[in-house]
Amino acid sequence: MIFIFLGAPGAGKGTQADMAASSQGWIHLSTGDVLREEVAKESDLGQAANEYMSRGDLVPDRLMVDMVAGRLAELNVDDVLLLDGFPRSRPQAEALAEALKTRAGGSGGVGSALYFRAPESVLTARLLGRGRKDDREDVIQNRLRVYSETTEPLVAYYREQGLLVEIDADRTVEEIQADVLDRIGAVLPH
């Protein structure tokens, strides 16, 4: 089953997915980490993606869909996957839904989409504190603008499907993690 972690850059999706995966034996797929690995390896995907990432723009849907579909094919149907950084647009969400329909007769689909919310001032402070070379004030502001324009419509998409779960991301890491585990646990078959 797949759990999608949605939220603006700096909302804590990656931290929460890492913690949950480590403590529960689940799989965490961070498309941001995969993209950074590909850039470091200077692969074709990495070179193409880096052109967009260095400006703070989203990597085009086709590149992202191909990358995630390849990773999904490696999973067992009963794996619990925490998907962080994908989908980031409605076309990506629709492509994911299609990929899951063809996978093992449609089993192992999306359990829920966890939406991490935090004020922009909190997001900006967190991003500036990470120390990544692409976390500059101008790039951060562009990333938050791009997120708002392209990714926030996913909140409505998953709400319409009854899959959206809102998480207050302006709390301690431990409080958020307890909430995440409760919300995922409520959906998983026992």
Image (tube, rainbow, N blue to C red):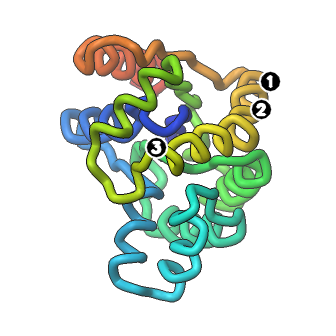
* Image depth: mark 3 or mark 2 in front: 3
Secondary structure of the residue carrying tag 1 is helix
Label number found at residue 137 = 3
Please tell me which residue is depicted at 19% across the width and 34% down the height of the picture. Answer: 23
Residue designated by label 1: 160
Which amino acid does the dot numbered 3 rest on? Answer: Glu
- Circles 1 and 2 in contact, beta carbons < 8 Å: yes
Label number found at residue 109 = none
Q: Considering only order in the chain, which callout, 1 or 3, is on the residue closer to the N terminus? A: 3
Where residue 68 sits: x, y (%)? Answer: 55, 63
Please tell me which residue is depicted at 44% across the width and 31% down the height of the picture. Answer: 124
State the residue in front, 86 or 188.
Answer: 86
Where residue 126 sits: x, y (%)? Answer: 35, 32
Which amino acid does the dot numbered 2 rest on? Answer: Tyr
Q: Considering only order in the chain, which callout, 2 or 3, is on the residue closer to the N terminus? A: 3
Q: Is residue 147 above or below residue 178?
A: below
Which amino acid does the dot numbered 1 rest on? Answer: Glu
* Image depth: mark 3 or mark 1 in front: 3
State the residue in front, 101 or 44.
Answer: 44
Taking 184 as reference, is 171 left or right?
A: left
Taking 162 as reference, is 142 left or right?
A: left
Q: Callout 1 environment at 10 Å: few (<14), some (14 to 19), or many (20+)?
A: few
**Whole-Å distance between the Cαs marked 3 and 1?**
34 Å
Residue designated by label 2: 157
